Image (cartoon, rainbow, N blue to C red):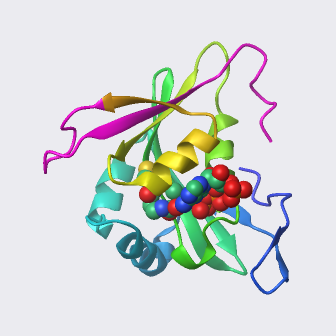
Amino acid sequence: MNAQMPVIKMDRCGGVFVPMLRWMERRDKERILEIEALSFDKPWNWDDFFRTLRNRDCHAEVVEIRREVAAYSVYELKGRTISILNLAVSPHIRRRGLGQILVHRLMMLLDDRRRRSLEAIVAEKNTEAQFFFRALGFRATIKPKHFGDGQDGYRFVYRVRKGDAGDLL
Ligand SMILES: CC(C)(COP(=O)(O)OP(=O)(O)OC[C@H]1O[C@@H](n2cnc3c(N)ncnc32)[C@H](O)[C@@H]1OP(=O)(O)O)[C@@H](O)C(=O)NCCC(=O)NCCS
């Protein structure tokens, strides 16, 4: 993976930071569980991450800011689709483009032959994530009562068009 992202962002005090993208590691556990707990009603525990990542088609990446994990994604390579299983950005640094970095990185894995789409399921009440995926060019279809508590979900899908792959960053 290209560990250094050529993206410079402004923080809230006007300083700059350079996000770094790398694979998730065991030493990230504490920070990831912290972000996870702040991001979801039903957060994954470390066992959930561990069990998911035992599947050789599943991978996890983090974005670091000043050597601290600020965001992460977990995804599965499923035939022609890449499925986003988990994605979160630390609440204090949202709307700074970190979620977009993680999703654009996955879009870069798409091509117009073998792996054509990227998908994520979002809970009906998670409007932030719905705005986010829409802004990144995903389209949604409803999945009635997708969640255990009877809540509907939306399946957000981004499909690569001919000639798009490699042109996303
Ligand atoms: C959804 C989430 C990952 C977005 O991450 P982020 O780093 O804040 O998003 P970005 O800064 O990359 O946003 C890119 C664009 O998406 C849209 N967007 C993102 N969050 C939005 C919000 N809360 N309201 C409206 N639009 C939003 C905007 O168009 C934004 O561009 P802009 O800031 O220039 O207007 C983050 O809010 C999060 O971690 N939420 C909790 C966990 C979650 O719901 N995960 C998704 C489940 S699969």
Q: Nearer the viewer, residue 30 or 9?
A: 9
In the picture shown, does residue 163 fall above or below 47?
A: above
Q: Position of residue 46 (x, y in %)?
A: 32, 68
Q: Is 150 displayed left or right of 105 in the figure?
A: left
Q: Is 73 displayed left or right of 66 in the figure?
A: left
Q: Position of residue 122 (x, y in %)?
A: 38, 45
Q: Nearer the viewer, residue 96 or 70?
A: 96
In the picture shown, does residue 57 fall above or below 115?
A: below
Q: Position of residue 6 (x, y in %)?
A: 86, 57
Q: Is 99 displayed left or right of 25 in the figure?
A: right
**Range drawn in magenta:** 143-169
Residue 149 falls within the magenta-colored stretch: yes
Q: Position of residue 118 (x, y in %)?
A: 53, 32
Residue 62 falls within the magenta-colored stretch: no
Residue at the spot 39% in from the left edge and 33% down from the top edge: 155
Q: Nearer the viewer, residue 1 or 151?
A: 151
Residue at the spot 25% in from the left edge and 64% down from the top edge: 42
Residue at the spot 63% in from the left edge and 43% down from the top edge: 135
- Looking at the image, how many numbered discs can be counted on the residues? 0
Residue at the spot 28% in from the left edge and 66% down from the top edge: 41
Q: Nearer the viewer, residue 149 or 23?
A: 149
Q: Quadrant of residue 65?
A: bottom right
